[in-house]
């Protein structure tokens, strides 16, 4: 069938040939053969002249013109020319005289042209010349029918008219010294190798590589095609029959494939080792053909006016080489074509006009890749566009963009399966969210499933994609079974079973996308797909999720317990910690058996496993006794700590200003009975009245609690725990610590008072209210109640009242009244505390005149100031008396300085012996020997009296301070605690 579409992918350009060194136009005649590579187009004339056409570098040269260089390869006649681009050599077959015995291989070394090659003679350097039919090697002289040379130049083949093929190994170029390769010439008969005498004469030869890396030989005869392996001996690979006659052949330039055109307008594509791989429809009888990239160019015998007419033309067709690309890239009548040639990175047509022997060179110049791709996309030939883009090695992004356009077009046409496959090939050009949004509304989710599996295999899938994939599988399951409970066996479109889809996905991605699959299970459960989620969790061996589904979604506690009996200890332990309260109500014995199994397998060095389960079953007294045993040390304290901890945690969660979205259920009471509000009559008889929950507070809802949760009832149960279980010191300490951790001030105050820490409520009351969850604390009542045990409580109480930002003037007056009545603090201490409030004035603490004497704060202040005034007056009187005494002493000193004393002592006042000269006499009229006086030089008789007077006054003054200290110390219940609390006074004395 003839190709259905025709495009214009090539432009024809006439190439002008110009000689070197400013020569004019060049005329080439009687062309017998051509060859080409990326640098040169070689044209061989029958006269033996070899012409090199090339583009000169470094000069302003038109693309429609080629430079020309020629040399005489043979003197008499030239027959064939071959380019060996891998070794930059050129091989020419010809002879220097009329004798066929003089046929030779002339080998030349080719140099690339450059701007420095002013002398064209440097382009070709002669290497060697060797005979074609070497008698020394047993080759028989014959007429040449076909010839081929490998691109590396190491292998050549010549077909003769008698049906023989001569093979030349390492013959065309001289071997270097030490080269392991050996020269070898051999021959074989085509008919003998094919075992068929009707193969016909050899029409063409092609040397192509095999998959093993060796070189093979393709022999095209009139009636058959043979491919041979030449090493070490000739071996027939394939043999194909040509139903009609042979017309032309060419290698495809991509490795081991070649094309054969045969009569009837058909063209077979051969593989060296597989035979015919495809068949194409050509455009008439073919005289010449050449492959270029993904195309094949042919020239037909359909000439207008005959081959010898001056206006004769042939039809040149360039069509896609692949059978999947059914289009013609170029079609045009041009002068009679002699041969096509791949050269200079383009496709050249060598032709002649009518009977003229002059050569005409055309270039079929391919249009830009973007123009060609846009044309194919507009014509909806997406497969062709992708093939061309791949062959041209375009960037991956361009190929993916073509797939994207193709996929969108297929989707609009309703070909969803093909669209999904194109979306998969689009890669980064498509946003997965866009594709998912297109495939999700389809009735069948199999296309969405396949696309998401592709994303997982490419490594670009996220957790969200895994969730969507599982939802697609869930939809497939529900579509197959109408709401599943187990895996169905109904097939989805395409013959794929849902069970197999799930199994394949989990087997491939179950471990690498475990987190995403778990998120998908949560989503399936919340969307009503608990049955599907249970199947997936079981297939994934996700014990935790499987038990969650059984307990929370299906309430199948028996199945959950049976499953826990078969799983490992870790999974069973996790399940008991999460669902133990539900499971123990269903079957306590089974739960206890699982716990004991876990405990028996746990090493003793890791502690007691029961400690982890006590919080779960803290409200199940009977079960706890069975689990822990009656003789378990510390079990009551542990249970009490757990209960008060859970209750405080729940109370804290429900009393926050901003309620949390996750609400905890109310805990039942200890004995399982209904919650009963505690009133002031029976709430807390051993606590102060201000700390007992009142009946009003138990009935009125709190503003900061949740509207649907009885927070007052929860607090009542908490007070029951604090009052009924805190008779021992360790219980009190544990309750105090937990209340402090949860910032529950009322409970902390109660426990502190029970333990005798009377200063702790003051410390908590002095903390910022934003750190506490408390009600108003009656400081004055607290000091009145416990100040007899701790007199220093009044210091902290008065300090807190003074520092408070609110109006506490009435409380300050009451505190001053008690301090004045019972003489609790010294007046300077009270003044120091009052000075800490800069806004406090005398009028703030002033009471009415009707107040009883000594009960008015101003009377207290006046009384204290009066005492100070009296003290000052006493001091002034003492100062006046001291001044009188000093004046008298001054007069005495003056008298002593200007008068004399008569000393009649004859004996020493100390030893009573007679005085001897020298002797010492004092104004006190005492006399002494010099050796009876001490080193201090004072009177031994008078100095003891003076010392006793001085020492007797200081102890008396210090003893007063000691009496005050021990008086306060004796009033404290614990001297050590009293000393520690004295240090806390500094915390209140700071501004």
Image (tube, helix red, strand yellow):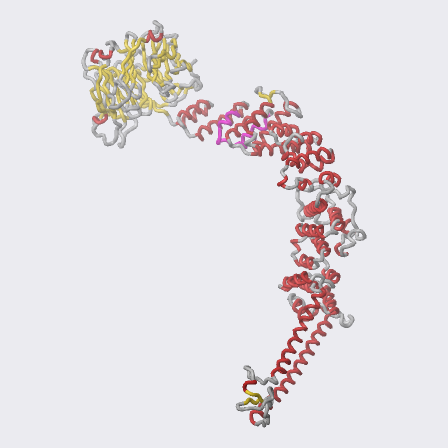
The x and y percentages for residue 327 are 42, 19
Quadrant where the C terminus sits is bottom right
Residue 49 in view (yes/no): yes
Residue 427 counted in the magenta span: yes
| Residue at x 63%, y 39% (from the top left corner) | 604
From this view, report whether residue 656 is shown above or below residue 863. above
Residue 463 or 889: which is nearer the viewer?
A: 889
Report which quarter residue 762 is drawn in: bottom right
View extreme (front): residue: 913
From this view, report whether residue 602 is shown above or below residue 689. above
Range covered by the magenta-colored residues = 419-442
Please give left or right for residue 168 compared with residue 463 in the image. Answer: left
Q: Main secondary structure of the magenta part?
A: helix
The x and y percentages for residue 867 are 70, 76
View extreme (right): residue: 681
Please give left or right for residue 660 compared with residue 852 in the image. Answer: left
From this view, report whether residue 857 is shown above or below residue 526. below
The x and y percentages for residue 188 are 30, 10
The x and y percentages for residue 855 are 76, 70
View extreme (top): residue: 197
Residue 953 or 402: which is nearer the viewer?
A: 953
Residue 916 counted in the magenta span: no
Report which quarter residue 435 is drawn in: top right
């Amino acid at each position: 069938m003839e190709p259905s579409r025709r495009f214009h992918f090539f432009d024809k350009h006439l190439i002008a040939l110009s000689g070197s060194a400013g020569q004019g136009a060049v005329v080439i005649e009687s062309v017998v053969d051509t060859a080409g590579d990326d640098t040169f187009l070689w044209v061989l004339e029958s006269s033996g002249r070899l012409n090199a056409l090339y583009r000169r570098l470094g000069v302003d040269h038109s693309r429609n013109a080629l430079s020309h260089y020629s040399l005489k390869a043979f003197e008499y006649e030239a027959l064939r020319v071959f380019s060996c681009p891998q070794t930059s050599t050129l091989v020419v077959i010809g002879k220097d005289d009329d004798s066929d015995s003089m046929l030779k291989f002339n080998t030349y070394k080719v140099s690339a042209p450059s701007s420095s090659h002013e002398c064209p003679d440097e382009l070709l350097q002669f290497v060697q010349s060797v005979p074609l039919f070497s008698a020394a090697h047993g080759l028989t002289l014959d007429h040449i029918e076909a010839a081929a040379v490998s691109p590396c130049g190491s292998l050549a083949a010549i077909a003769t008219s008698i049906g023989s093929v001569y093979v030349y190994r390492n013959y065309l170029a001289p071997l270097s010294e030490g080269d392991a390769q050996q020269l070898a010439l051999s021959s074989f008969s085509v008919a003998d190798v094919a075992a068929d005498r009707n193969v016909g004469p050899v029409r063409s030869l092609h040397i192509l590589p095999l998959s093993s890396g060796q070189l093979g030989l393709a022999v095209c005869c009139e009636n058959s095609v043979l491919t041979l392996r030449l090493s070490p001996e000739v071996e027939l690979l394939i043999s194909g029959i040509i139903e009609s006659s042979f017309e032309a052949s060419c290698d495809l330039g991509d490795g081991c494939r070649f094309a054969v055109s045969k009569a009837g307008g058909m063209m077979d594509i051969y593989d060296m080792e597989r035979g015919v791989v495809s068949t194409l429809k050509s455009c008439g009888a073919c005289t010449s053909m050449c492959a270029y990239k993904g195309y094949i160019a042919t020239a037909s015998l359909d000439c207008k006016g005959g081959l010898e007419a001056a206006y004769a033309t042939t039809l040149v067709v360039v069509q896609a080489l692949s059978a999947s690309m059914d289009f013609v890239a170029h079609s045009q009548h041009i002068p009679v074509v002699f041969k096509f040639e791949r050269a200079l990175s383009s496709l050249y047509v060598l032709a002649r006009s009518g009977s003229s022997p002059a050569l005409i060179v055309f270039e079929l110049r391919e249009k830009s890749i973007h123009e060609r791709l846009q044309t194919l996309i507009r014509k909806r030939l997406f497969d062709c566009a992708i093939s061309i883009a791949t062959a041209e090695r375009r960037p991956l992004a361009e190929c993916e963009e073509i797939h994207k356009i193709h996929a969108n077009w297929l989707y609009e046409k309703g070909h969803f399966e093909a669209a999904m496959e194109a979306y998969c090939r689009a890669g980064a050009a498509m946003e997965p969210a866009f594709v998912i949004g297109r495939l999700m509304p389809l009735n069948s989710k199999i296309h969405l499933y396949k696309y998401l599996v592709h994303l997982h295999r490419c490594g670009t899938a996220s957790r969200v994609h895994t969730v969507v994939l599982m939802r697609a599988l869930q939809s497939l399951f529900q579509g197959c079974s109408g709401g599943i409970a187990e895996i169905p066996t109904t097939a989805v479109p395409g013959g794929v079973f849902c069970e197999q889809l799930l199994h394949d996905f989990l087997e491939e991605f179950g471990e690498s996308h475990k987190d995403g699959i778990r998120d998908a299970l949560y989503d399936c459960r919340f969307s009503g797909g608990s049955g599907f989620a249970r199947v997936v969790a079981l297939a994934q061996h996700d014990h935790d999720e499987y038990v969650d589904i059984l307990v929370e979604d299906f309430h199948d506690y028996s199945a959950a317990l049976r499953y826990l009996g078969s799983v490992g200890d870790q999974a069973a332990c996790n399940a008991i910690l999460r669902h133990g309260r539900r499971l123990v109500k269903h079957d306590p014995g089974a739960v206890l058996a699982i716990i004991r199994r876990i405990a028996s397998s746990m090493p003793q060095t890791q502690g007691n496993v029961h400690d982890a389960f006590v919080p779960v079953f803290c409200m199940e007294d009977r079960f706890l006794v069975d689990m822990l045993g009656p003789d378990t040390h510390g079990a009551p304290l542990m249970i009490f700590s757990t209960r008060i901890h859970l209750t405080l945690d729940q109370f804290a969660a429900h009393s926050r200003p901003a309620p949390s979205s996750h609400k905890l259920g109310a805990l039942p009471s200890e004995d399982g009975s209904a919650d009963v509000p505690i009133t002031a009559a029976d709430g807390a008889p051993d606590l102060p009245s201000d700390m007992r929950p009142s009946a009003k507070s138990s009935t009125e809802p709190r503003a900061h609690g949740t509207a649907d949760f009885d927070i007052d009832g929860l607090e009542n149960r908490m007070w029951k725990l604090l009052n009924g279980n805190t008779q021992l010191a360790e219980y009190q300490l544990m309750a105090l610590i937990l209340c402090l951790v949860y910032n529950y001030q009322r409970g902390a105050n109660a426990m502190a008072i029970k333990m005798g820490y009377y200063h702790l409520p003051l410390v908590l009351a002095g903390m910022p209210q934003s750190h506490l969850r408390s009600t108003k604390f009656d400081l004055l009542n607290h000091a009145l109640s416990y100040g007899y045990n701790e007199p220093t409580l009044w210091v902290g109480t008065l300090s807190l009242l003074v520092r408070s930002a609110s109006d506490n003037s009435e409380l300050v007056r009451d505190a001053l009244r008690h301090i004045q009545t019972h003489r609790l603090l010294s007046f300077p201490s009270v003044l120091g505390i009052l000075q800490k409030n800069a806004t406090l004035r005398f009028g703030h603490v002033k009471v009415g005149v009707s107040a009883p004497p000594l009960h008015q704060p101003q009377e207290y202040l006046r009384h204290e100031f009066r005492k100070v005034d009296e003290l000052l007056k006493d001091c002034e009187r003492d100062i006046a008396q001291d001044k009188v005494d000093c004046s008298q002493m001054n007069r005495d000193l003056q008298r002593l300085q200007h008068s004399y004393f008569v000393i009649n002592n004859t004996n020493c006042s100390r030893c009573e012996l007679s005085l001897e000269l020298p002797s010492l006499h004092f104004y006190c009229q005492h006399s002494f020997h010099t050796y009876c006086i001490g080193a201090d030089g004072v009177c031994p008789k008078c100095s003891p009296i003076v010392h006793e007077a001085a020492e007797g006054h200081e102890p008396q003054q210090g003893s007063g301070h000691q009496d005050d200290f021990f008086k306060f110390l004796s009033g404290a219940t614990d001297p050590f605690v009293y000393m520690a609390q004295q240090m806390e006074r500094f915390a209140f004395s700071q501004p």
